[in-house]
Image (spheres, grey):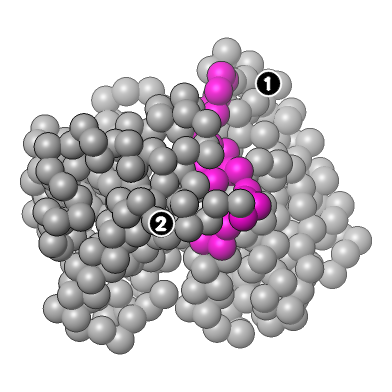
Amino acid sequence: MSSDLSTDQAAAQLDAHTLEMVKWHFSPETGCPYWLEKAKSLDFNPLTDIKSFADIGKFDHFDDEILRKEDPAVFIPNAFAGKPYNVFETGGTTGMPKQRIGWEDYKTDYTEFSDHYGPDFFPAGANWLMVGPTGPRRLRMAIEHLANIRGGACYFIDLDPRWVKRLIGMGEMKMAKAYQEHVIDQAATIIRHRDIGCMFTTPKLLESLAERMSLADAGIGGVFAGGTTMTPQYVRFIEEEVLEGKVNFAPTYGNTLMGLAISKKRGPGEYSLTYHAPQPRAVLRIVNPDDTSKQMEYDEYGRVELTTMTKEFFMPRFLERDEAIRRKPCDEFPWDGVGDVRPFQSGSKTVIEGVY
């Protein structure tokens, strides 16, 4: 996913991609029922008035409740009519989950992720263990695809994050801890009895697993982790104490609606994380919470705004439930990054993150 483009070239690429995707989703021949119907109520014409990515600001913020209320079939592009699809779920604790359909996007995201890290960071040919949500989650298929294209198989330990968040919300901390121990018991068993070289899990579960065994001594060469807040202090703890400075660590920021944002390389002693979206397929902006038409200045905190633009899914200006620091483009990624991500307004309200 890293790019050799200059910042100006990356901006031009984004503008061209924006025009292509808007034309795709708002043309009757290729667009989906939801956006073709939505276009009738807009006060502008997407096909003629969107001339660059900046014009995406003409759209209102995407309301993700639509993904709970609407049959996901309304998001099938006419170009894909009749083509079998996957249904992925995201978010929530109880009630109707948000759902997104998909075909190949998850493969594209994780193939780029694999290419970014090359054959040595995660040992080529190694088997993987995923300790996280499977079932209807996009992540389950994505991690297996990642293992397969790198020449390995993938073992799974299932985790139900909705149940964990519900237990914590009810104050059942003892039960939540028991469930976590149940998951870790299974993971430790697989590592001891199967040849596992790479892992995906959440930082909190990784920490619990490392209390049972030395992951480096168990043969784990690379760990890919995401899902919960990772402060610089916590990143240092994971790298130095949990992974003993012997296991490659790839922290990521992603979800079913965006894909996967990769963390830029850090120098020795640098523990603050900066993630860069898979642009131009997805774009992350750090906006002023009080006036979301305005971006924050570099090195300032603001709310995370996501725009996703692929042939499978178009979602403009979705306000994530996260805040982050706006970071400058870097050598690897010639577009803005988001740094030190944390739950939105986490300093002024109680946030339940659970183990994921």
- N-term-proximal mark, 1 vs 2: 2
Q: Position of residue 204 (x, y in %)?
A: 58, 45
Q: Nearer the viewer, mark 1 or mark 2?
A: 2
On whether residue 2 falls in the magenta region, the answer is no
Q: Is residue 302 left or right of residue 72?
A: left
Q: Position of residue 212 (x, y in %)?
A: 76, 50
Secondary structure state at the residue bearing disc 1? helix
Taking 304 as reference, is 217 above or below it? Answer: below
Q: Residue furthest right?
A: 193
How many discs mark residues in the rendered view? 2
Residue at numbered disc 1: 174
Residue at position x 79%, y 58% in the image: 155
Q: Nearer the viewer, residue 16 or 93?
A: 16
Secondary structure state at the residue bearing disc 2? loop
Q: Quadrant of the C terminus?
A: top right
**Type of residue at label 1?**
Lys
Residue at numbered disc 2: 30
Q: Is residue 299 left or right of residue 172?
A: left
Q: Quadrant of the N terminus?
A: bottom left
User: Counting other residues with Cα less than 10 Å from the Cα at mark 2, is it few (<14), some (14-19), or many (20 or more)?
Assistant: some
Q: Are marks 1 and 2 in contact (CB under 8 Å)?
A: no
Q: Residue furthest front?
A: 29
Q: Nearer the viewer, residue 71 or 237?
A: 71
Q: Is residue 341 in view? A: no
Provide the residue span drawn in magenta: 83-105
Residue at position x 12%, y 37% in the image: 43
Residue at position x 18%, y 72% in the image: 11
Residue at position x 65%, y 60% in the image: 143
Q: Position of residue 175 (x, y in %)?
A: 70, 21
